[in-house]
Amino acid sequence: MEELAVIDVYWGSGSPYCWRVLLALERKGLPWRSHLLNTDLQEHKAPQIVAMNPRGRLPVLRDGDYIVFESLAVLYYLDLKYPAPPLFGHSPEEAGVIMRVINEFQAYTEADLMRLVNELQSPAPRFGEGLTRAMHTVAREARTIEGRLSKGDWIVGDAVSAADIAIYPCIRLLHRALLRPGAQELATRFLPAEVHYPQLARWLRRVEALPGFGKTLPPGWQGLPVFGESAG
Ligand SMILES: N[C@@H](CCC(=O)N[C@@H](CS)C(=O)NCC(=O)O)C(=O)O
């Protein structure tokens, strides 16, 4: 059997987009070499990175001579290049649903969710009107995902897919941000997740039980209990 070349991944700690790529690589059992960049030091704007991604954004994946960036494009590339196990389902119909769910999440939830995360991570979070609107959007969309998960273990179909891999890091980042001391005002709306979103809570644990999950944890998260053990 042909030995797989090691895939290089340039990533930043705490980035949901980077986390997607690591989860996909582990899901497929592919060997990867970590290049963890310090974004505080602007290492992602170094000429070597900008040569690969002119936007100077992470993640960037290099597989031999081939370079790809934008997390979803990376997932799609990996799935076509290394088909088993599939990330985009077993049929064109399933692929369509997976892509649709990811696009819906990106179009209608992700920006508001990241806005909440960023605000809650700031030294003095400000809960203005915009943040309240963002909270309502995220709560509504979380309810939609909760509904999907009430019908099965995974967001689409009967196995973990790109939909789970794309959405999990964002939800987990939000959960972590909600546990911060300044977040109580918002946190009561979402936590304990087991009460407000029981299916989502079970799904988080399911993702975290996947083989190789521990290797994808951002530094500083190592040793953090899996979801549920840490939830307030
Ligand atoms: N749409 C991109 C987003 C990539 C992105 O924004 N990455 C962030 C890390 S969370 C980044 O590199 N930010 C640095 C910057 O904007 O200069 C993807 O899905 O990969």
Image: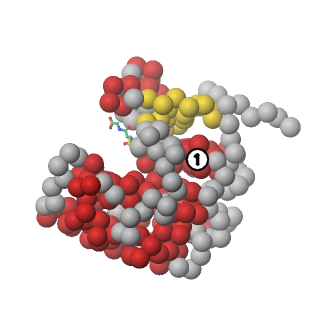
| SS under mark 1 | helix
Q: Would you say 187 lies left or right of 126 here?
A: right
Mark 1 highlights which residue?
A: 214
Q: Residue at x 65, y 70 (%)?
A: 158
Q: Residue furthest right?
A: 1
Picture coordinates of residue 181 (x, y %)? Answer: 26, 55
- When the figure is inspected, residue 114 is found, relative to residue 104, above or below; the finding is above
Q: Residue at x 53, y 79 (%)?
A: 150
Quadrant position of the C terminus in the picture: bottom left
Q: Nearer the viewer, residue 216 or 68?
A: 216
- When the figure is inspected, residue 47 is found, relative to residue 15, above or below; the finding is above
Q: Would you say 70 lies left or right of 174 here?
A: right
How has the structure been colored for display?
Answer: secondary structure
Q: Residue at x 35, y 63 (%)?
A: 109
Q: Residue at x 16, y 60 (%)?
A: 127
Q: Quadrant of ligand 1?
A: top left
Picture coordinates of residue 74 (x, y %)? Answer: 54, 44
Q: Nearer the viewer, residue 80 or 19?
A: 19
Q: Nearer the viewer, residue 104 or 182?
A: 182
> Which amino acid does the dot numbered 1 rest on?
Gly
Quadrant position of the N terminus in the picture: top right
Q: Based on the displayed image, in which of its 4 quarters is residue 180 positioned? A: bottom left
- When the figure is inspected, residue 202 is found, relative to residue 169, above or below; the finding is below
Picture coordinates of residue 195 (x, y %)? Answer: 41, 76
Q: Would you say 23 lies left or right of 142 here?
A: right
Q: Based on the displayed image, in which of its 4 quarters is residue 104 positioned? A: bottom left
Picture coordinates of residue 225 (x, y %)? Answer: 51, 54
**Residue 225 visible:** yes
**Residue 72 visible:** no
